[in-house]
Image: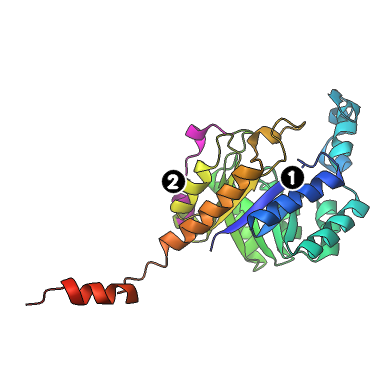
Amino acid sequence: MVFITAELGINHNGDIEIAKQLIDMAKAAGCDAIKFQKRTIDKVYSKEVLDTPRESPWGTTTREQKMGLEFDEKQYDVINEYCKQKGIEWYASSWDIDSQLFLRKYNLKHNKVASAMITNRKLLEVIAEEKKYTFISTGMSTVDEIREAIQIFKKHNCPFELQHSNSTYPMKIEEANLRCIETLRKEFDCNVGYSGHEAVGYIVCVAAVMLGATSIERHITLDRSMYGSDQAASLEPMGWIRLVRDIRTIDKILGDGVKRVWPSEISVMKKLRVTT
């Protein structure tokens, strides 16, 4: 069965009540997990970047904008408890070592390597040493860069799955290049999923599943017109419900590939089959 993750990312806009609504939205659709993004702002961004002017609901600098979007420990405690109550898994992509160490508090089942972090070897070592099943996004990456990342996970005997991705927000559909799913599978002999950032509905995700994607990750939002760089590349509630529904249907349609005579065919076979 395809593993489906609702990417909340930073679409909660730093508001725990919006996060809860997104968790409810993910749960109602029947997906497998939800995902956040965790950053230690002063470790991920330089002082020069953080001090640059930037208008946002939280102030006039990039620092204020980044801090406004970031949940703290108290808020993650709320998220952890809320997801337990709702019966849905959560995990997060860390953008620095301190964030990964912070996430260990919650004993999460999965890890995620964001495309931007695939060349951060020190961070990959910290993630891989946990030996948790890890989704590795491959946007912006060469085959050699992917290979180097995989070597770290193999060294630590850490199970992993690649996710084909394009890191443009939103992605142009002509850049989806979904045949890379098969290319990566053959090259690295592993499961390959798809992490989508397209703005045109969810047909790309459906096509990815038809091409053998073993996981799907897609951004979700309450409203695509909300503040935030990821909102336009996200699915609203009805689109998300339809995506999960259609993927589950495709799972049934594709089957296991074993040629068999179905019990439902027996009576038809007796009626129509001619043997000589």
Question: What residue is disc 2 on?
Answer: 179
Question: What residue is disc 1 on?
Answer: 9
Earlier residue among tags 2 and 1: 1
Q: Nearer the viewer, residue 85 or 110?
A: 85
Q: Magenta span covers which residues?
A: 171-185
Q: Is residue 21 visible?
A: yes
Residue found at x 71% / y 58% = 111
- Mark 2 → mark 1, Cα distance in angstroms: 26 Å
Give x and y (percent) for residue 28.
Answer: 68, 55
Q: Nearer the viewer, residue 141 or 30?
A: 30
Would you identify the image quadrant in which residue 80 lies? bottom right
Q: Nearer the viewer, residue 218 or 275?
A: 275
Are circles 2 and 1 on residues that touch, CB within 8 Å? no
Main SS type for the magenta part?
helix
Residue found at x 81% / y 64% = 85
Question: Is residue 176 on the magenta stretch?
Answer: yes
Question: Is residue 227 on the magenta stretch?
Answer: no
Query: How is the structure coloured here?
Result: rainbow
Residue found at x 51% / y 34% = 173
Give x and y (percent) for residue 199.
Answer: 59, 34
Q: Nearer the viewer, residue 7 or 147?
A: 7
Give the structural element (helix, strand or loop) at label 2: loop
